[in-house]
Image: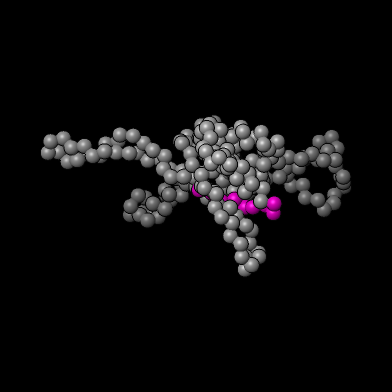
Amino acid sequence: MAHGKIGHPGGVIDKFKASIARAGGFARPTRYEVVLTAPQMLKEQYPEIDILEQDIGLQCNTISMPGHDLQTQAVKYGSAPVRDMVTSHGYAGDVVASFYLDRALKTKMFFDAWQSLAVDMATHKANYYSDYVGTMKIYQLSSIPWTETTITTKEDVSGGSRDHRTSKHKHGMVEEKYNTYKTIRTHGMKVEEVYPATIGAIEYAYISSAEVAKLAVEFQYRKWETIRNWVK
């Protein structure tokens, strides 16, 4: 069979490459963005909460997008084979993440304060659910070709060594175009009613002098949904 047709190994590979090209490439696990929104009561404690939330999102070292499962029940009619029929659905597992720590451990203090909204540290009694739940958005990122244009004063019209292969002169000005890449969001997930259920220990050791301290956090949540109109 001729090369490139179905049935030939080369044909399968070509179709695979074409399918990835149509999709715009692979999703990379290193390309992601995390946006945390803390409960309103925590915002009252931290006037700079918007900047802090942004910094903590940028310091997120690892995170897992939560899953979803269909819950079934075995149903049998007469002598027919058993069918597993869907009776409900659930949102599997917790959101497990880790964060790089700054030298003052502000990230740890932030999550400690968030946890304290759930349980009074003096009376050990639980507080209202609505007081300690927030939201989290997780985005898959990618990039697209992007042309940046800058306009500068023309310094030398007689020649020189500057490379203006993509520039053109307009009324004594130089328009330069640079081919770069722009980061975009290609998929988004909003996780609702989130709170840090478990804050991990910080490991210290002299042998780890070149490493950055990290904090593991497991978030509990109620449900998630796909963000349909994410901003690119």
Which residue occupies 35% across, 49% down?
6
User: For this rendering, which residue is in front, 175 or 141?
Assistant: 141
Q: Residue at x 59, y 50 (%)?
A: 99
Q: Is residue 176 left or right of residue 34?
A: right
Q: Quadrant of residue 176?
A: top right
Specify whether residue 7 is painted magenta.
Answer: no
Residue 141: quarter of image: top right
Please name whichever residue, 31 or 154, is drawn nearer the observer in this view of the structure.
31
**Quadrant occupied by the C terminus:** top right
Give me the residue at 56% from left, 45% from top.
Answer: 32
Residue 103 to residue 37: above or below: below
Q: Is residue 221 left or right of residue 117?
A: left
Residue 23 at least partly seen: no
Instruction: Looking at the picture, tell me which residue is in the foreground, 56 or 186.
Output: 56
Q: Is residue 105 visible?
A: yes
Q: Position of residue 94 (x, y in %)?
A: 46, 45
Q: Is residue 78 left or right of residue 48?
A: left
Was residue 103 drawn as part of the magenta stretch in this picture?
yes
The structure residue drawn at horizontal position 66% and vertical position 33%, both measured from the top left corner, is: 44
Identify the image's colour scheme: rainbow, by chain, secondary structure or one colour. Answer: one colour
Tell me if residue 160 comes above or below residue 118 in the rendering: below
Above or below residue 206? Residue 1 is: above
Point out the residue furthest to the bottom here. Answer: 207
Residue extent of the magenta highlight: 96-104
Residue 73 pos. (x, y %): 26, 38
Q: Relative to 230, is 100 above or below?
A: below
Pick the quarter of the image with the N terminus.
bottom left
> Residue 51 in the image: x percent, y percent?
69, 40
